[in-house]
Amino acid sequence: MSLSSLPAIAMALAAAFASAAPSITHAQAVPSAGNWPQRPVKIVVPFAPGSSPDVFARIVGDRLAQRLGQPVVIENRAGAGGNIGTGYVAKAASDGYTLLVSTNGPLVYNTVLYQKLPYDPFKELRPVVLGGGQPNVCAVRADSGIASLKDLVNEMKRRPGQFNFSSTGIGSLSHLGPELLKARTGTFAVHIPYPSSPQAIMAIIQGDVQFACVPGVAVMPQVKAGRLRAIAVSTGERSPLMPDVPTMKESGFPEVENMAWMAVMAPASTPPDILQKLNAELNAVLRSADVRDKMHAQYMEPIGGSLEQAEQFLRDELRNMTPVIKRSGATVE
């Protein structure tokens, strides 16, 4: 029987009960894996559309929505080197409906770079899964006359003060990688941050900067179009997705080695059974052939693993990168 067919007195009592007891209803609706999700899930990306974490979130989000039976909505909250969106999720409700796809900078490096960070990623966020990784690709304009990373270093030494490099933000790997290169080679270049990797790449093409070391998804299409030249990848071994691009070590700089990665995070107090369910579903997503193929097309490799492995990875990154960041001299007020 519909509500409209009830006698007027019953309708009044029902309305009075509903308005008088919202806390009881809320207390009965404690989220758990058994009743989650019952509405759309939001994934916040703390960078602009078209950035690598944004592309990753959309690839994974499409397949995750199919597995959960609920829409997965991607929301971009860019700014402050990824701190705005990352901090937003750190303070969000711990109900499994607000997740984060973030990267090296906001989740690890910024804890060293910033004197006052508006969130603590190791206390207010919980890693759900290590989603994917990719090398940064160092690139110059195709008509620059620079054919290798060694050429770039030599030119910076020959023409001090005449080189700028772009990045995806202060504290990002695309910022700290070149800073490490500068420290190792005794060279100088001015850092100019941009909101996303496509904008950092356009800065090279337009002549605003001379080089960048950013994810391959932004670099390689411009390399294939003949506008840029890829001169090195940041990982220790050549990427099977870019087999013709030499490594830093092959270029003569063995101590300049790093990887850009993306992790799926949740507010720290999210119920453990929801975290476990999310981890299982995301691992299934990352194992699927279509997601792998889509990630490879964007020069990304799926990773996956347990909640514990993801958390240990972030702590290892903090331990390994803290001396690198401090040695670079990079700080943010």
Image (spheres, helix red, strand yellow):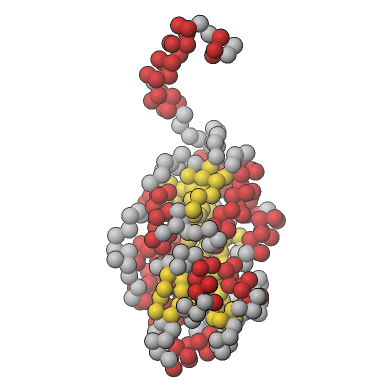
Percent coordinates x, y for residue 227 in the rendering: 61, 78
Quarter of the image containing the N terminus?
A: top right
Query: From the viewer's perspective, is 115 left or right of 68?
Result: left
Name the residue rendered at 70%, 55% in the picture.
290
Q: Is residue 131 visible?
A: no
Name the residue rendered at 44%, 57% in the picture.
78
* Residue at the outermost bottom position: 158
Q: Is residue 189 visible?
A: yes
Q: Is residue 185 above or below residue 3?
A: below
The picture quadrant where one finds residue 175 is: bottom left
Q: Nearer the viewer, residue 278 or 119?
A: 119
Percent coordinates x, y for residue 278 in the rendering: 55, 45
Percent coordinates x, y for residue 63 in the rendering: 64, 48
* Residue at the outermost front position: 206
Q: Is residue 33 above or below residue 245?
A: above
Percent coordinates x, y for residue 101 in the rendering: 50, 54
Quarter of the image containing the C terminus?
A: bottom left
Name the residue rendered at 59%, 39% in the picture.
70
Q: Nearer the viewer, residue 147 or 110?
A: 147
Q: Is residue 15 above or below residue 93?
A: above
Name the residue rendered at 66%, 64% in the picture.
297
